[in-house]
Amino acid sequence: MKLVAAALLLLAVFGWEQPEPTPPPPKLFAIVFRTGPAWDAAKSAGQQAFMKQHSQNLGSLRKAEKIALGGRFGEFGLVVVRAADMAEARAMLLGDPAVANGVFQADVHPWSTIYEGCTSAISPPPR
């Protein structure tokens, strides 16, 4: 009985160390870019205002392993990002001067996988 009391006393004094909870895996969100009101139709994509900064923003997100995949289709751009929630996904656009200055408009949508096994290239990076 004294041993149990001593053990409980030690736990009360030093606390019961529990492992840190594992954060939930990030969710995927699709960001669709399209030309905005400040897009200059007389210039190529590479000559648009703020294009260099737009590329730098995407590069920073890629380096931080936030971008799962990205590319262009037709007149649109698509970037699938890893984020905890919609607010974090939208916040990724705050640092993009091309969006802030209307060269691009961007819409954020939750990404839902339809065919399991087809998204191995975009699943969260191993920790």
Image: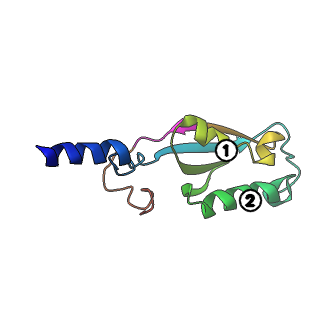
- The one nearer the camera, 15 or 29, is 15
Residue 5, position as x, y percentages in the image? 19, 42
Q: To which residue does mark 2 refer? A: 55
Nearer the observer: mark 2 or 1; the answer is: 2
* Position of residue 110 in the picture relative to residue 36 (left or right): left
Residue 125 percent location from the top left of the image? 45, 61
Observer-nearest residue: 51 or 5? 5
Q: Which residue is mark 1?
A: 33
Mark 2 element type: helix
Answer left or right for 78 relative to 102.
Answer: left
The answer to which of marks 2 and 1 sits earlier in the sequence is: 1
* Mark 1: secondary structure: strand
The quarter holding residue 1 reads top left
| Rendered view: 48 above or below 105 | below
Residue 110 is a magenta residue: yes
**Labelled disc at residue 125:** none
Location of residue 85 with respect to 122 vertically, above or below: above
Local crowd size for mark 1, using a 10 Å CA cut-off: few (<14), some (14–19), many (≥20): some
- Magenta stretch mostly in which secondary structure? strand
The mark total stands at 2
Amino acid type shown at disc 1? Phe
Residue found at the very far front of the displayed protein: 2
Q: For the magenta stretch, what is the residue range?
A: 108-112
Indicate the amino acid at tag 2. Answer: Ser
Q: Do tag 2 and tag 1 residues touch (Cβ < 8 Å)?
A: no
Residue 71, quarter of the rendered image: bottom right
Q: How crowded is the residue under tag 2: few (<14 C-alpha within 10 Å), some, or many (20+)?
A: few
